[in-house]
Amino acid sequence: MLISREFNQAINVQIGREMEASLQYLSIAAYFEGRYLKKLAGLFFKQAEEENEHAMKFVKYILEAGGNLEIPALAAPKATFESAEDAVGLSLKWENDVTKYIYELVEITLKEKDYIGREFLSWFVSEQLEEVSSMDNLLGVLKQAGEKNLIMVEGYLSH
Ligand code: MG
């Protein structure tokens, strides 16, 4: 077995978080779809898929390392939003939080001198730079356009 009990449990918790993020992004995609904002909806449908892929990367790691998969209970996603800014602001907050959670996982591997685990987490560390930066950029664009000009954001996202 190449995974400690502590790291295994922490990954199980993270799998739940990635799945919750996937559901949250799905819910945000539906919100944009309901407002006829297809590009924004498409962007969040894609994000939802990516979060699911993140969860699967962790699942495969646990299984390959000989650990136990225990998926925690998932919280229901937020289903209603005040505005596009509200929905994307929530997403940016999530991406900042997940960066912190990934760092906590890295800390466990450093403490345990688990170099395989550390190497595995490198992909997630790099991914967070892209995730936080793209969500921050989207929020900035939404703020500049304003809630009444979201159709211009759709045009912007088409390029
Ligand atoms: Mg993720």
Image (cartoon, grey):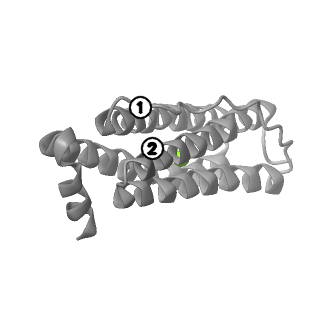
Q: Residues within 10 Å of mark 2 (few under 14, many from 20)?
A: many
Q: Residues within 10 Å of mark 1 (few under 14, many from 20)?
A: some
Secondary element at tag 1: loop
Compared with 49, 7 (above or below) is above
At label 2, the amino acid type is Tyr
Picture residue at 29% right of the left edge, 36% below the top: 85
Quadrant showing the C terminus: bottom left
Residue 159 appears left or right of 49: left
Q: Does the residue labelled 1 lie within 8 Å of ligand 1?
A: no
Residue of label 1: 81
Corner quadrant of residue 60: bottom right
Compared with 55, 143 (above or below) is above
Q: Position of residue 46 (x, y in %)?
A: 49, 59
Exactly how many numbered labels are in the figure? 2
At label 1, the amino acid type is Phe
Q: Which of marks 1 and 2 is nearer the N terminus?
A: 2
Residue of label 2: 31
Pointers 1 and 2 in contact (C-beta within 8 Å): yes
Q: Residue furthest bottom?
A: 159
In depth, the one of 7 and 112 nearer the eye is 7
Q: How far is mark 1 from mark 2, CA to CA?
A: 8 Å
In depth, the one of 75 and 124 nearer the eye is 75
Picture residue at 30% right of the left edge, 48% below the top: 133
In depth, the one of 74 and 70 nearer the eye is 74
Q: Where is residue 18 in the image (x, y as percent from the top left)?
A: 61, 42
Residue 116 appears left or right of 28: right
Picture residue at 18% right of the left edge, 42% below the top: 148
Secondary element at tag 2: helix
Picture residue at 50% right of the left edge, 48% below the top: 30
Label of residue 146 in the image: none
Q: Where is residue 53 in the image (x, y as percent from the top left)?
A: 62, 57
Q: Where is residue 33 in the image (x, y as percent from the top left)?
A: 44, 52
